[in-house]
Image: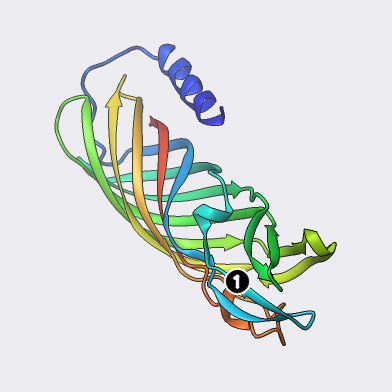
Amino acid sequence: MRVHRVVMATALAAAFVPGSASAEGLAGRWSLAVQGGTDVELSGNVHEGGAGAVLGLPTRVESRSFKDVYGPGFRGQLSIGYGVGAAKEVFVRGSYYKMNADTLQVGTVAGLVLNADFSEYKEWGAELGYRIHFGTTAFKPYVAPVVGLRFISKLPATFSVPAASVVLIDVPFYDSSTVGVFGADLGFSYDVSPSVALGIEAGLRYQTGLSDLEGLLGTGLENINDVGSRWSVPVLATVTFRF
């Protein structure tokens, strides 16, 4: 629904601007771009598998990916660009992303189901990019390599064995983390006027590992959270204003 509202808002904004089939060169012009969408998870685990003992009972944990643990979230982005050539611009971008987790089985304790409920994933990010546009008509594809940082909130987890009425609340799992991010965008924009463009964009992002905590110290499962990196594809609707 949020993505739909972003698209509707961009369309309404464009409707009040006189249309034009040709775009001016980008050199010396500033831009402000607003984006909304989501991430498609490709790979990366929240935790690995392992074997140990919890409360003195034999415990087995199976690996679970970000896609297993979290449902699709909402990504919002705002960027400011400056044209350094007729079809080239540099930009800085701020972003926010949030995902919610569902309770899921991650293993067994003495043969009984072991569930985990991870806290919501919240991320603030900043990226620096270089965008190259192609074509001379109102419809233009573009590519943009990017590099940046993401600041991610703590990710504790609550583990439970329902059959035994055992619950371990807010077990420290990942600390607040500052991670690197690298990738590229591929997009298409359409100039509805010399000052407004609508578009859609997909990217590829690699995010480095999270800062793990030893909440499972002494269980033999201490290393299952020595991961946390992820590959994802952000898919975004875009409206760009140039001035």
Q: Where is residue 59 in the image (x, y as percent from the top left)?
A: 67, 76
Image coloring type: rainbow
Q: In the image, is residue 85 above or below residue 52?
A: above
Residue on which the image places disc 1: 61
Name the residue at the right extreme.
165
Residue sitting at x 71%, y 74%: 110
- Of 158 and 139, the residue lying toward us: 158
Residue sitting at x 82%, y 64%: 164
- Of 70 and 56, the residue lying toward us: 56
Q: In the image, is residue 40 above or below residue 24?
A: below
Rendered-image quadrant of the C terminus: top left
Q: How crowded is mark 1: few (under 14 residues within 10 Å), some or many (20 or more)?
A: many
Q: Position of residue 147 (x, y in %)?
A: 38, 61
Along the horizontal axis of the image, is 119 left or right of 90?
right
Along the horizontal axis of the image, is 55 left or right of 156?
right
Q: Position of residue 184 (x, y in %)?
A: 31, 53
Residue sitting at x 68%, y 69%: 111
Q: Can residue 231 be seen in this view?
A: no
User: Count of labels shown?
Assistant: 1
Q: In the image, is residue 238 above or below residue 101?
A: above
Please, what secondary structure does the residue beneath circle 1 have?
strand
Tell me the kind of residue under disc 1: Val
Q: Position of residue 140 (x, y in %)?
A: 22, 32
Q: In the image, is residue 192 above or below residue 207?
A: above
